[in-house]
Image: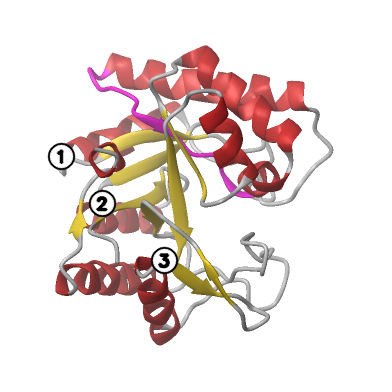
Amino acid sequence: MLRRLDLNSDMGERETAEGLALDAALMPLITSVNIACGGHAGSRNLIRRTASLAQQHGVVVGAHPGLPDRQSFGRIEGDVTPNDIRCLVSEQVRTCSRVLDGEGLRLRHVKPHGALYNMAARDEGIAQAIVTAVCEVDRSLLLYALAGSVLAHVGEAAGLTVVYEGFADRAYRGNGQLVSRSETGAVIEDEDGVRAQLHQLIHGNVMTVDGTLIPVSIQSLCLHSDTPDALVLARMIRKELERTGIEVLAASHVHR
């Protein structure tokens, strides 16, 4: 069973009163935050605001680059070349880093968003483009990747420190990939279902949609802020981890 686990969440994606309030409520429950940096969502002002909130709660800050398609929230796979991806990831990560520098804060990691994340999980060319962009910006940045994915392997081969990520609110396929959000049942919304998958993951496995149990080794768990009842689920997850004696701390400490 896991002894340590990072909890991360994607934030800085909605500038509505509701979105800002949810980010503020979730922030004390997590240890790492991935801030949208102008692709699928976000703005310099929202990066600054979210990073300041993270600093107040001792949460480590990362960049969350996505495909530049705000209409679909970066969740629809498009016809983009590896060079396109290298450029957009580099640009978005540098934007986030510059905003943080202006606030006296440091960027610690990179986690791709949505379709970009899923494409990189299985496509070596796209994974290599993301890894190249991260290396060009700062080789000391941690790279979040789906546990067991192509992106994880390519990142490690390039010498990056990779954080193996898992999801308690997303359905898995037998090959370890996530079920597409376009398919029914891709998101686990009920509390009992999320709790059950959480306990599978902390014991090193997960039940797939075809009913098989596969091994999954994670170092970080994502808490999606746009899953229905996200705050209720986040509080439950934090409570369950504490109850089972798992130390919750940022990924940089999990790797020690």
Q: Cα distance, mark 1 to mark 2?
A: 9 Å
Q: Is residue 142 above or below residue 241?
A: above
The residue nearer to you, when weighing 74 against 167, is 167
**Tag 3: residue type?**
Gly
The residue nearer to you, when weighing 2 against 94, is 2
The segment highlighted magenta reads: 103-114
Q: Which circle's residue, 1 or 2, is located before the other in the chain?
A: 2
Queried whether the magenta region covers residue 116, the answer comes back as: no
> Can you say which quadrant of the picture contains the C terminus?
top left
Q: Quadrant of residue 128?
A: top right
Q: Give the residue number, with chain letter if any, for mark 2.
A: 27
Q: Which mark is residue 56?
A: 1
Q: Is residue 132 left or right of residue 191?
A: right
**Tag 1: residue type?**
Gln
Instruction: Name which residue lies at 42% across and 31% down.
Output: 161
Instruction: Name which residue lies at 45% across and 52% down.
Output: 165
Crowd tier of the residue under label 3, counting other residues whose Cα lies within 10 Å: few below 14, some 14–19, many 20 or above = some
Q: Which circle's residue, 3 or 1, is located before the other in the chain?
A: 1
Q: Which circle's residue, 3 or 2, is located before the other in the chain?
A: 2
Q: Cα distance, mark 3 to mark 1?
A: 33 Å
Instruction: Name which residue lies at 43% across and 24% down.
Output: 96
The residue nearer to you, when weighing 16 against 72, is 72
Residue 168, can we see it? no
Q: Give the residue number, with chain letter if any, for mark 3.
A: 204
